[in-house]
Image: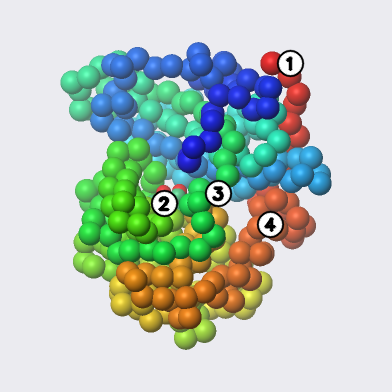
Amino acid sequence: MGTEKASVNGNQKLHAFFQGAVVPMDEAKVSVMTHALHYGTAVFEGIRGNWNEEQGKMFIFRMREHYERLLRGCKILLLDIPYTADQLCDVTVDLVERNGHQSDIYIRPLVYKSAEVVANLKLQELASDFTLITVPFGNYLGTDILRCCTSSWRRVDDNMIPTQIKSAGIYVNSLLAKTEATLAGFDEAIILNQDGHVSEGSGENVFMVSGGKLHTPRIEDNVLPGITRETIMQLAQAEMGLEVVERSIDRSELYLADEVFLTGTAAHLTPVVELDCRPIANGEAGPVATELQKLYFDIVVGRNPKYLHWCTTVVPRMVPA
Ligand SMILES: Cc1ncc(COP(=O)(O)O)c(C=O)c1O
C-alpha cells in the first residue's frame, strides 16, 4: 500500500467498518491477544476504486468477484462471518461513500480470527470478525515498466497453504520474494513453483506473448486466480481475437518471449522489459501489453459502456469532518 497516508482524506477523517459498525479509523483497534496477529489466521482482499475526475464518481472494479474469493477463503479457514457477498458489497459502497474519496483508492476487507486466545490451533473453536478500510492509493509498483528477477524463494504449494485464496499467512512467501528482489535493485520477483515452473509475481499474475498467443501459468501451478488475470484473458480473446493458453511455463520461455507482463489489482497491467538482466525482446513495452493496458484503463474508470457491469459506481458523500 505504498506510503499513502491512511488517516485523512482532504479534510475528511477516514472511517473503518469494525465490529459491525462504521467508526473513526483511530477507534478501529484490536488487542495484542488477537489470534490472527500471532498466526496469520485471516483472509483479505485488495479491491481498487478508480476515481473518474470528469464524472466526479468512483468506479469500484469487480467488487463482487473479490468478495466471492474472500468467502471461498473463509470457507477453507473456517472463518465464520454473518455476511453474504451482496451484504459485503453494500457495506463497502457505504464506507466508500462515507469516506468521500476523490482520488484512486484501495479497499481492504479483512476477515480474521478475532478470538483473544493465543495457544489454540483449532480453527473451529475460534471466533471470527470482518473489518474494512479504504485508503488513497496510487501507483503500487512505483514504475510503469518492470525489471524483474527470478526469486530464490519458491511459491508455496497448495498442499502446504492453499494458494487459491488470499490468506494473510501465505504472504510471508511473497514478502520474502519481494524484499529479496528490491534489495537487489529489481522492481519485482517472478516466483517459480516447487517443480520449477513459473508461478506468479509477489502480488501479480504473469503473462507471456509468444507465437502470436497469450500464455499464462495454469492455476494448478499454485497461482492465485487473479481477477485481473481473468479480466485480461477475456479482453485478449474478445477484443483482440488472441488465443489464450493456460499451461505450465518454463523460466527460459520468459527470456525468449515476445512480451511479458504482470497483472493484479494493485499492479494493474505492467510490462516486464527485463528479466534476470536479459531484455525481453527489444527491452520495451510490447504492442499486446500496450493495447490491453489501454482497454483495461478505460474499463476500470467506467469509460467503456460494454464493460460497465464490471464497475460499481459510487458518488462521494461530503460529511463534515
Ligand atoms: C500473490 C498474488 N497473485 C496474484 C494477484 C493478482 O490478483 P488480482 O488480480 O485478483 O488482484 C495478487 C493480488 O491480489 C496476489 O497477491
The reply to whether residue 89 is visible in this rendering is: yes
Q: Position of residue 33 (x, y in %)?
A: 28, 16
Secondary structure under tag 2 reads loop
Q: CA distance from mark 3 to mark 4?
A: 17 Å
Q: Position of residue 253 (x, y in %)?
A: 35, 78
In this view, the residue farthest toward the left is 119
Q: Earlier in the sequence, mark 3 or mark 2?
A: 3
Q: Nearer the viewer, mark 4 or mark 1?
A: 1
Q: Position of residue 122 (x, y in %)?
A: 22, 27
Q: Quickly name the residue at label 1.
A: 320
Secondary structure under tag 1 reads loop
Q: Quickly name the residue at label 3.
A: 139
Q: Earlier in the sequence, mark 2 or mark 4?
A: 2
Q: Quickly name the residue at label 2.
A: 203
Q: CA distance from mark 2 to mark 4?
A: 21 Å
Residue at screen point 57% across, 16% down: 24
Which colour style is shown? rainbow
